[in-house]
Amino acid sequence: MATKKPDTSADTAQDAHDNDENETDENQTDENETEFLEEGAAQPQRPEPLSARDGSPAAALWSMNSRWRHINHGSFGAVPVFAQLRRLAYLQEAEGAPQRWFAAAPARLAQARAGLADFIGVDADHFGFVPNASAGMTASIRALMLSAGDELLITDHAYGAVAFSARREARQRGAKLRTVPIDLDASAEKILAVFGKALAKKPAGLIIDASTSSTAREFPVAALAELAKKHGVPLLVDAAHAPGVQSRPAEGIAASAWVGNLHKFACGFRGTAVLVAEKKFAKELYPVIDSWGMDEAFPARFDHQGTFDYTPYLATVDAVTGLEDRIGWDSIRTYIESLLDYSTDVVADAFDAATGEESRVDVGAPAPGMRLLSLPGALAAAPLEARNLRQRISDELGFETQITSWRDNGYLRLSAHAYNTADDYERFAEDVVPALVAWSHES
């Protein structure tokens, strides 16, 4: 399904303001198979369920409700049981002696940062904890200290909450937010060419998603960071989906600020993310809520925020290190990608057979841990329709998945983690795809 291209003559952000089963001989090769083999391609093999180091099923480490099949790890993640228990222990400690708990919290958060430094790929004194990627991006946008007449750049793939924050900050400071349209299938070279011209005009900042939420594609953030540095333009990277699904995701990214959620693929608790900052830019970085740590240097000022619940940060370290001990992050990442390669073909083939149309989407560079497929007809063409369809799938069909809308087209975004199995996606293809095709014909 082709996507509609926007009108690039106007600032889109400002406008928003305003088989035939024939039997064959055993020695005969199917015609399609011949073509397939000639192309030199290899069909993804069906992965066996992932096992922990002790041979037990990896899925047993999670407490997923069997009422639903969860194939949307990329939105809210899922915390392993052993980490849930550690958080309960921290909560009991806090409630047993609140004064001692809060007095020791900054030092324990600093220790937690040190425990995550290698996982993130930067030194512990280069990042602080924030509640989520949106909070980290909001703090970073504020740190740009926009002035009247400044221009801030963002793409039309940007996460909605981040785009809202950028639009509000620009409006309040008399600056302009310009949305740069990037085609879904754009190559890294094309993206760099587009921003090479844009950055030459010296905007006040550029906001880029490492992996996009609505379109499940990667942006060449390392190369963009070097390009922005060359032009002296601050680059803010929304890497909400990167920790866990990428090894040492912030390593070597020369951005002014880089924000990653720990509650998604890293399997930490909701309300846990990291904000990595370049030393000079960090001087203007403050939490979105003022508290008693404001006079501390970055990142210590993010370690001391009054009566904030610090237990998710501490227990997330237990989740990350515990999964390395029990399964191994390299094994998890390899499994996720092999499962998605197989499952995307299974679901896409089901859609294509039912509709006679192509559901696979060229996204230029597929994001790790996620895949995008076109939905049939006009399903989920608008954001509200996408949210309603996601809920209907959950309520009526028993699958937790993600439906997105971008440029008036609806998409199914698949994701996976260690607890998922091929059967989850085969059942989706068997049970959900026919229903979605039928719903696409409803008036």
Image: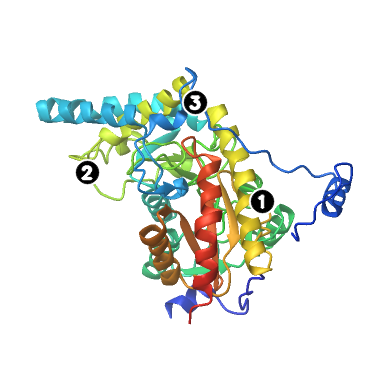
Give the alpha-carbon distance from disc 3 to disc 1, as whole Å.
Answer: 26 Å
Q: Amino acid at mark 1?
A: Ala
Disc on the earlier residue, 2 or 3: 3
Q: On screen, 417 above or below 323?
A: below
Residue 215 horizontal/vertical position (percent): 56, 59
Task: Kindly report the distance in space between the C-alpha atoms of the residues bearing marks 2 and 3.
Answer: 29 Å
- Indicate the position of residue 284 as horizontal and vertical percent values: 39, 46
Residue under the point 43% across and 47% down? 70
Q: Residue at x 63, y 65 (%)?
A: 354
Q: Position of residue 110 (x, y in %)?
A: 33, 27
Comparing 175 with 223, the one in front is 223
Q: Which of the 4 image quadrants contains residue 32?
A: bottom right
Residue 99 visible in this rendered orientation of the protein: yes
Residue 291: which numbered mark, if any?
A: 2
Give amino acid for label 3.
Asp
* Element at label 1: loop
Task: Using the numbered discs, state the Cα–Cα distance from disc 2 to disc 1 in whole angstroms.
Answer: 41 Å
| Disc with the residue nearer the chain's start (2 vs 1) | 2
The residue that appears at 54% across and 55% down in the rendered structure is 430
Query: What colour scheme governs how the chains and residues are painted in the rendered image of this protein?
Result: rainbow
What residue did someone put label 3 on?
Answer: 118
Question: Relative to 252, is 293 on the left or the right?
Answer: left
Q: Report which residue position mark 1 lands on.
A: 365
Q: Residue 256: where, in percent of width, then height?
A: 51, 45
Q: Which one is earlier in the sequence, the residue at label 3 or at label 1?
A: 3
Badge 2 marks a residue whose secondary structure is loop
Front position among marks 2 and 1: 1
Is residue 206 visible in this depiction of the protein?
no
Q: Is 334 rendered above or below residue 347?
A: above
- For label 3, the crowd category at 10 Å Cα-Cα, with few meaning under 14, some 14 to 19 and many 20 or more, is some
SS at circle 3? helix
